[in-house]
């Protein structure tokens, strides 16, 4: 039986979300594969856990030359780590160094998918529309007057390298701008100022390697002013329309843009692409290379309405991981 190392937890602020994703995947695992849960604590320790409900267990090493290594007996790895130190190319680099197959995007695709600045640059290079934005770094001479001249209220201020809307502020008056910038810089040295738009929020899942396919799109209807961390994970009052009610032409455009966004960052395996729909204008917002994977998360829900259930989706992702490994990694 093929053994699959589920890597979850991690050091990012999305630690708990990663645990929820891993529990859902473990629960729905296909019968012809054996899941091996590998928990990373908030401090970065690796642990073979007793069960998904008891995260105690024996601390181990991933490195093959140190102590008891989790490399032994695992055929492929499935990272379910959201945010920094998991979705950003770091764990993928470790897996590459170890010379083992894994599910999902490689180092480049993961890094581009995590960094909102370089992600948007990749989208623009592909000719995909994005809302106007500027980039600020901590050492820049920040000109608040220039920002007020370039943008209309509201604007969003975002750290470049965090997920789950952590550190994001919606600025509705210019008096709030400086505080929002300071808040974003607490989380990253590089931030974006992005034009706010009155838009429908649409999401689309992508699956595949060389010839990826897009799911039917879904719509997020935030309970709060925007789909922030509290709305996503605390209050849970956001509504979802799955699939979204869209004109056929808009739906087809979103699915096409989702595949192009996926390919623009050299993603592999799976991702979720988020859009703004302003009237009939579609803007690509961002891509998530390890999207939420709970039973109520958009990524699996969108594939369910497109015709692939949760367990089939997991199996397909494992197969895509092996496929990429056979075709490209061993060839190199």
Image: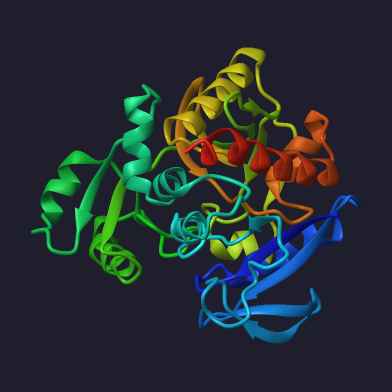
- Residue 263: percent from left, percent from top: 48, 29
- 152 left or right of 55 in image: left
Quarter containing the N terminus: bottom right
**Model colouring:** rainbow
- 75 left or right of 210 in image: right
Which residue ends up furthest to the top in the rendered image? 249
Which residue ends up furthest to the left in the rendered image? 141
The residue located at (43%, 36%) in the rendering is: 265
Give the vertical position of 192 relative to 306 (above or below): below
Q: Is residue 21 visible?
A: no
The residue located at (52%, 53%) in the rendering is: 225
Give the tally of numbered discs: 0
- Residue 99: percent from left, percent from top: 53, 54
- 55 left or right of 169 in image: right
Give the vertical position of 235 relative to 151 (above or below): below
- Residue 138: percent from left, percent from top: 18, 64
- Residue 20: percent from left, percent from top: 72, 66
Q: Is residue 192 visible?
A: yes
- Residue nearest the viewer, comparing 197 with 124: 124
- Residue nearest the viewer, comparing 31 with 252: 31
- Locate residue 205: give its quadrant: top right
- Locate residue 194: give its quadrant: top left
Give the vertical position of 83 relative to 112 (above or below): below
The residue located at (50%, 55%) in the rendering is: 92
- 159 left or right of 238 in image: left
């Amino acid at each position: 039986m093929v053994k699959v190392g589920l890597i979850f937890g991690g050091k990012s602020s999305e630690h708990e979300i990663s645990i929820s994703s891993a529990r859902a995947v473990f629960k729905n695992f296909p019968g012809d594969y054996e899941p091996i849960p590998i928990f990373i604590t908030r401090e970065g320790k690796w642990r073979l856990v007793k069960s998904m409900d008891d995260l105690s267990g024996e601390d181990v090493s991933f490195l093959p030359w140190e102590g008891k290594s989790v490399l032994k007996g695992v055929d492929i790895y499935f990272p379910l780590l959201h945010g920094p130190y998991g979705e950003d190319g770091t764990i993928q680099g470790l897996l590459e160094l170890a010379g083992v197959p894994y599910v999902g995007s490689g180092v480049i695709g993961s890094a581009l998918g995590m960094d909102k600045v370089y992600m948007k640059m990749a989208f623009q290079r592909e000719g995909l529309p994005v809302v106007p934005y500027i980039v600020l770094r901590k050492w820049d001479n920040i000109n608040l007057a220039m920002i007020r001249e370039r943008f209309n209220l509201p604007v969003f201020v975002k750290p470049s390298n965090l997920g789950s809307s952590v550190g994001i502020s919606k600025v509705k008056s210019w008096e709030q701008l400086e505080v929002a910038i300071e808040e974003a810089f607490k989380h990253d040295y590089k931030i974006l100022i992005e034009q706010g738009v009155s838009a429908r929020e649409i999401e689309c899942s992508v699956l595949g390697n060389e010839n990826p396919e897009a799911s039917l799109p879904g719509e997020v209807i935030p309970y709060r002013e925007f789909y922030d961390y509290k709305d996503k994970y605390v209050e849970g009052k956001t509504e979802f329309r799955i699939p979204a009610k869209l004109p056929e032409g808009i739906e087809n455009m979103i699915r096409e843009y989702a595949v192009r966004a996926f390919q623009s960052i050299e993603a592999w395996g799976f991702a979720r692409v988020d859009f703004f729909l302003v009237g009939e204008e579609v803007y690509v917002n961002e891509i998530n290379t390890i999207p939420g994977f709970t039973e109520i998360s958009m990524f699996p829900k969108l594939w369910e309405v497109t015709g692939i259930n949760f367990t089939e989706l997991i199996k397909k992702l494992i197969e895509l991981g092996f496929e990429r490994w056979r075709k490209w990694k061993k060839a190199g």
